[in-house]
């Protein structure tokens, strides 16, 4: 009887140790970080919302999209149905809508491969503006946009269209490259 009282605790400890070892091995999950192929999304978000704040802490830009996909190759983000609302202090509100957009280089370059509609609210003493185009590139670091496709800009007093453009937002200039047609309606007194 004395031998069994010594062996029983040792046997229980060995069984308990074996059970812990088996459960520990069974509980190890396979690596969760799946290696995505460069052309496959490694992150997908539905109904994505991104808000950028200015130095004063107020919202500066709000970007919403039905779906966002991040591709590791080139650190690229594809946005489905993007809707950008830009509200810089002292500037008229700007809204940009497109069926799809691609953001590259940490958001410093954005490409709208399809149609693009831009609506700018009227500045003080000015007119609202609507611009429709396609295949538009935007460099957010240089505040510069360009396209080789047709573009049309409409406001209350003028309508202008052309093929290809370069727009410098800092200088507030628009250069239409070819086939330029413009109509200006002077204000009636």
Image (cartoon, helix red, strand yellow):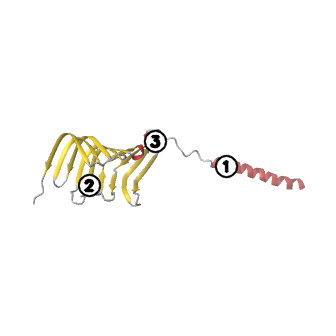
Question: Label 2 neighbourhood size at 10 Å, few (<14), some (14-19), many (20+)?
Answer: some
Task: Examine the rendering and report whether any part of residue 1 can be seen.
Answer: no
Q: Please state the horizontal and vertical placement of residue 19, each as a whole percent of the image.
A: 71, 50
Disc 2 versus disc 1: distance between alpha carbons? 61 Å
Disc 3 versus disc 1: distance between alpha carbons? 34 Å
Q: Please give the residue where the numbered disc 2 appears in the rendered image.
A: 120
Q: Please state the horizontal and vertical placement of residue 64, each as a whole percent of the image.
A: 37, 54
Q: How many numbered callouts?
A: 3
Dot 3: element? loop
Residue closest to the far front: 171
- Residue placed at 22% from the left, 56% from the top? 128
N-term mark: 3 or 1: 1
Towards the viewer: 172 or 31: 172
Residue closest to the far right: 2
Q: Is residue 128 left or right of residue 101?
A: left
Label number found at residue 33: none
Q: Please state the horizontal and vertical placement of residue 56, each as a whole percent of the image.
A: 40, 60
Label number found at residue 72: 3
Q: Quadrant of residue 78?
A: top left
Q: Quadrant of the N terminus?
A: bottom right
């Amino acid at each position: 009887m004395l031998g069994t009282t010594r062996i029983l605790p040792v046997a229980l400890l060995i069984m308990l140790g074996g059970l812990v070892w088996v459960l520990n091995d069974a509980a190890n999950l396979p690596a969760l970080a799946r290696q995505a192929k460069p052309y496959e999304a490694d992150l997908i978000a539905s109904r994505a919302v991104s808000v950028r704040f200015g130095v004063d802490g107020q919202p500066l830009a709000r970007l919403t999209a039905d779906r966002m996909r991040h591709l590791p190759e080139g650190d690229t983000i594809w946005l489905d149905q993007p809707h950008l609302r830009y509200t810089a202090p002292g500037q008229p509100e700007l809204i940009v809508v497109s069926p799809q957009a691609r953001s590259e280089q940490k958001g410093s370059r954005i490409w709208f491969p399809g149609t693009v509609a831009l609506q700018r609210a009227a500045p003080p003493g000015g007119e609202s503006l609507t611009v429709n185009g396609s295949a538009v590139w935007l460099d957010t670091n240089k505040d510069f946009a360009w396209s080789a496709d047709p573009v049309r800009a409409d406001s209350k007093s003028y309508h202008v269209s052309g093929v290809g453009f370069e727009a410098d937002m800092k200088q507030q200039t628009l250069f239409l490259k070819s086939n330029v047609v413009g109509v200006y309606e002077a204000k009636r007194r």
